[in-house]
Image (tube, coloured by chain):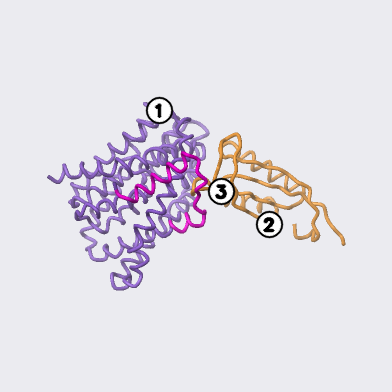
Amino acid sequence: MDPVVLFFLLGVIARLLKSDLKLPDALYETLSIYLLLAIGLKGGVELAKHPVAMVAPQAIAVIAMGLVLPLLAYPVLRFLGKFNTFDSAAIAAHYGSVSVVTFAVGLAFVIKQGVAFEEYMPLFVALLEVPGIVVGILLARTLAQGSARKKIHWGALAHEIFLGKSVVLLVGGLLIGSFAGPQGIDPMRGLFFDLFKGVLALFLLEMGLVAASRVTDLKRAGPFLIVFGIVTPVVFSMIGAALGRLIGLSLGGTTLLAILAASASYIAAPAALRIALPEANPTLSIGAALGITFPFNLTLGIPLYFEIAKRLHF
Amino acid sequence: MQTHPKKLLVIIGESALEKFLVRDIKQFGAHGYTIADVRGGGTHGTREAVWEGDRSIRMEVICDEAVAKKIAEYVLSVYAINFSLSLYFGDVTVIRGDKF
């Protein structure tokens, strides 16, 4: 197990044992800004080396996956899980969107395995943040009955989604990285690239504390959501891995796309959905995404998705 | 020194509401506000402000009683159904009456 995951487990244990350990708010905010920018920059530098004609078809396929995943999750939640329209759509949106931190841990994992991967993958992270959220909101608003079938304020919603911190920093980093190129970014290498794993470890310590704080949510959510939070990422990872293979990604790239498909958003999606679908109970979606899927992906999921990708790259 | 009686309206709620509350109180005629990040708990559980989705704010508005009541009624009718909210009034005395 990668040592960064041990930092996460330390956070989980500290919280469960009611330790007074707490990272200052400002540090949490700083670390998350750093991680988003660093991932974006790294992807941007690599993106500049690849022709648009090669990356564009892959990007379109990845966006299509982002649109389809919540459509698969919704009926399961609505009809098997018996959640109402809003909760089903909101949870589906979280699972359609992605978790940048899960991707970061996946990146560390792939690098440790020493397998090749498309280093412009952060582009796909940025592309996958939005579609799942939009589909979730559309699902809720078109399937809702009566007065709940409100008009969607697209202007305000677009602002919330596209100008949320994670999209701004990822896309900003990608643009700066591809504009500046390797030489331009080189003086910042020490901060943004060399320190990356240490910062990730510190951030995961905090995420362990946060994830473990959602345990009480799970008691309210019930057993279905717990099973959903584990089965969905595994099924979605297979879709991600199959797509990765189909669009010609390497073993590392396929693994990372499987990880992205398996991950559930807990920064961009909750913020956008709280505004766009206030009727949905955030305890359910966040409890599942952060309390179950995130820890599962970090500990068991990522190595499993690597194995799935390996099967496809025999 | 001349002083003026005013109402203090305090709204404690999810930070997702911040920009909507700011817009609303201005529409009802309040001249200003103060916002602080806070944490706490109640019947709906605890909000510890440990990450983005868990943050809460306390908004303080000093204004005329009629404005404060209108804001409170509106906020309760629009947001209280789906968001955790606490509201209360207080009597305050200000020095510059025209500022509020």
Residue bearing the label numbered 2: B32
Disc number for residue B33: none
Q: Using the image as rendered, state which of residue A206 and residue A48 is in the foreground.
A: A206
- The stretch in magenta equals A2-31
Q: How crowded is mark 1: few (under 14 residues within 10 Å), some or many (20 or more)?
A: few
Disc number for residue A223: 1
* Residue A49 on image: x %, y %: 23, 66
Cα distance between the residues tagged 1 and 3: 30 Å
User: Which of the chains is orange?
Assistant: B
Residue bearing the label numbered 3: B15
Question: What amino acid does circle 2 point to?
Answer: Gly
Q: Using the image as rendered, state which of residue A239 and residue A313 is in the foreground.
A: A313
Q: Do labels 1 and 3 share a chain?
A: no
Classify A235 as above or below A250.
Answer: above
- Residue depicted at x 18% and y 52%: A250
User: Which of the chains is purple?
Assistant: A
- Residue B84 among magenta residues: no
